[in-house]
Image (cartoon, rainbow, N blue to C red):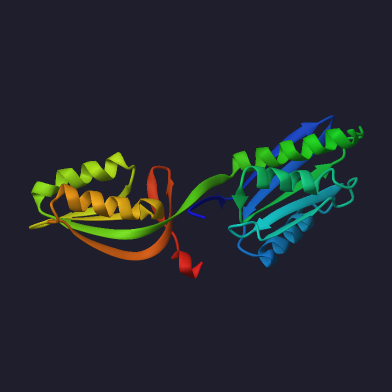
Amino acid sequence: MDQYKVVYEGGEAEIVEKKSRFIASVQPIQSEEEALAFIHALKKKYWDASHNCSAFTVGKNHELTRCSDDGEPSQTAGRPMLDVLLRENIHNAAVVVTRYFGGTLLGTGGLVRAYQKSTQAGLAAAVVIEKQQGYLLDIGTDYTGLGKIQYLLAQRDISVLDTEYTEQALIHAVIPSDKKTELEKAVTESTSGAAKLIWGSQTEFAVIADKVHIFDHAQKS
């Protein structure tokens, strides 16, 4: 998978349905152990709540998914929460929705809607990013070819990390995996082979608040 969405920073949001309070807490996770620890911490924090329902997914292909209704009628809480994560295609995330019962029954349909709405609100309060698979690349060029290369990169919406200016220019960039071959050909052709391309390791990256963030190398994640 070349691109996938993850929770970068957790968040919390609250909604009220017929006087019942629903507090959604969202957290990034990397394992089942982290998810269970997060759920346990929320249950401890909201020990006096009517329910602490949960859902989480682990892995780039949702290899592990779990959910719990925590005493609510079967399939009215945990599964609808998990469905939101899967529908939004968000990976490595856990959500706990805490309910303080307000005295009015919502019915099964009302519960499903409330838990899904709460999960969506929690995700909206979190920072969700799209990670991409890519390769680090250094491009060395004389100043005659610099403008051509900068144009090629901008045309393909490729993220430049930095540029060094000495006797020649050295562009540090990260290239999405699916653009690697085509970009190499385009740079070579536009500079008649004068530009020097030095490919680095495979990595994961994301653009967050207009800034490129490099994560651990994909093969090590």
* Residue 214 image-quadrant placement: bottom left
Residue 49 at least partly seen: no
Tell me: residue 168, above or below residue 151: below
Residue shown at the point (56%, 51%) measured from the top left: 6
Q: Position of residue 24 (x, y in %)?
A: 71, 44
Frontmost residue, 125 versus 44 = 125
Compared across the picture, whether 182 is left or right of 32 comes to left
Q: Residue furthest bottom?
A: 220
Tell me: residue 98, above or below residue 31: above
Q: Position of residue 87 (x, y in %)?
A: 66, 43
* Residue 169 image-quadrant placement: bottom left
Residue shown at the point (50%, 48%) measured from the top left: 130
How many callouts does the rendering have?
0
Q: Position of residue 51 (x, y in %)?
A: 84, 48
Frontmost residue, 187 versus 82 = 187
Q: Position of residue 179 (x, y in %)?
A: 36, 51
Residue 57 at least partly seen: yes
Compared across the picture, whether 35 is left or right of 44 comes to left
Frontmost residue, 188 versus 126 = 188
Residue shown at the point (87%, 47%) measured from the top left: 50
Tell me: residue 219, above or below residue 101: below
